[in-house]
Amino acid sequence: MNCAQADELVGAFALDALPDDEAAAFRAHIAVCARHAEQAAELRSTAEQLADSVEPIEPPPALRARLLEAVAREPQERRSATISELAPAARAGEARRVPRGGWFTPNAWTAIAATLAIIAAVVGVWAYNAQDDAAGDLATAATDVRGLVDADGQRVGTVVYFGGEDRAAVFIDNLPDAGQGRAYQMWSIEGGEPVSLAVMDEGTHGRQVSVVNVDPVQSDALAITIEPAGGSEQPTSEPVFITET
Amino acid sequence: MADLNEPGPRTTSGDVDDASLLRDIQRGDRGAFAALYDRHASAAFGLAVKVTGDRGMAEEVVQDAFLALWRQAPRFDPARGQVRSWLLTIVHHRAVDAVRRRTARPERAMPDGAEEYLAAPGRPDEQAEQALDAAAVREAVSLIPEDQRRTVEMAYFAGMTHVEIAEATGVPLGTVKSRLRIGLEKMREHLKMKVLD
């Protein structure tokens, strides 16, 4: 989609009135076009205000009762930090550590899951680094394991830290193609600032294992963003994946 | 002190309360959740009834939407948007979904309103716009020229695609597209002028 076509469709996009194929093409366009990304966000925000043009209607009291009963049984999702949340803390000069431990809560099931992940990770490191004599050392030196989640909090992979080596192995189960001219870039968030660790090749997808140099003591989180192929100095978008906090 | 019987925030100061309620909800406070429900349930139900035209279906939509808000609250960043807009976005998307399922219209993936909102970039100018009450929003909508307003409302309240609107009205597709865009742009300008008033 070019800018002239996007001009035509921006209103329909803001109102979710595009068929799926056109909506996907429009999303691909605004991933690379700041002008239309901004215009789409503005018009979407305007469209959302149509909700306020409706006369309120008092719902039946039974709905409130049902809902509060349902909420008592409904667990809340866990929170994952984003770069934009982590960065302001550093600018304000506050030393902020991201709390750890989602994985190491005293719960038998998470302990078992963690053990399985370490085993999977060790096997993965061996497979990835089969010719590397260091692999054996790495495999015995895991100091921490954290889940890698997407923006919805869904698990997409695992990060195994090797504290003694200042390295980490990043396992991603099924990486989608970042798109033409785009590449995944991995960052370590240190004291609120993103530090680039690695840029993946354009077109990288599927099961991925990467070993990066990172000091687990300095690093609050690992984050992965989609950047123009070749990578960026600073992240230009919100992370698509981030380690669980 | 705001009148607690008044449904929904009428001023920006009202939303300060929403933000603090949300912080309590993020900590699992069900009392705060009940308070948030009391503030916005009428707006949510009014919107769901308008879209679905069916009170039973609207009740289900509102219940699902508030439950989604409860579940996802820990991931909501109050600095990036308003709780009320987020809630009404979820209600709107779920209501449109419910209608599309009922009428078995060609399937179109309606993004989950909650996810869309959480994933969207910040809404820097929304703060000012939200200072408007519902009457001001209605007036801004009424100032959009008839053809454009009706087209925008068919997309928003009936959940129709541009193609469906063109087929239903006999208006050429290109005209529908431009009415949707120009209609929204005019609404946006009217809302901006309201804020300046």
Image (cartoon, coloured by chain):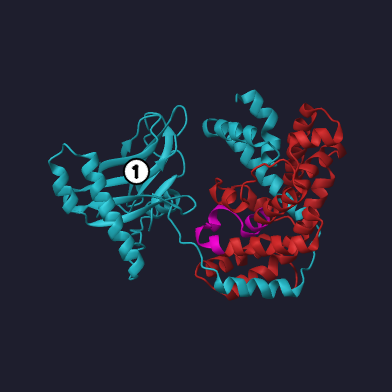
Chain colours: A cyan, B red
Q: Is residue B1 in sight in this rendering? A: no
Horizontal side of A113 relative to B136 (left or right) equals left
* Residue occupying image coordinates x 24% and y 48%: A123
Across and down, in percent, residue B146 comes to 87, 39
Q: Nearer the viewer, residue B151 or A130?
A: A130
Across and down, in percent, residue A143 comes to 22, 57
Is B139 located above or below residue A97 in the figure? above
* Residue occupying image coordinates x 40% and y 53%: A86
Is B54 located above or below residue A71 in the figure? above
Is residue A92 on the magenta stretch? no
**Residues in magenta, as a range:** B71-89
Is residue B85 on the magenta stretch? yes
Kind of residue at disc 1: Trp
Across and down, in percent, residue A31 comes to 53, 34
Q: Quadrant of the N terminus of chain A?
A: top right
* Residue occupying image coordinates x 44% and y 53%: A85
Q: Is residue A50 in sight in this rendering? A: yes
- Crowding around mark 1 (Cα neighbors within 10 Å: few <14, some 14 to 19, many 20+) is many
Q: Please, what secondary structure does the residue beneath circle 1 have?
A: strand
* Residue occupying image coordinates x 64% and y 64%: B66
Horizontal side of B110 relative to B132 (left or right) equals left
Quadrant of the image occupied by residue B15: bottom right
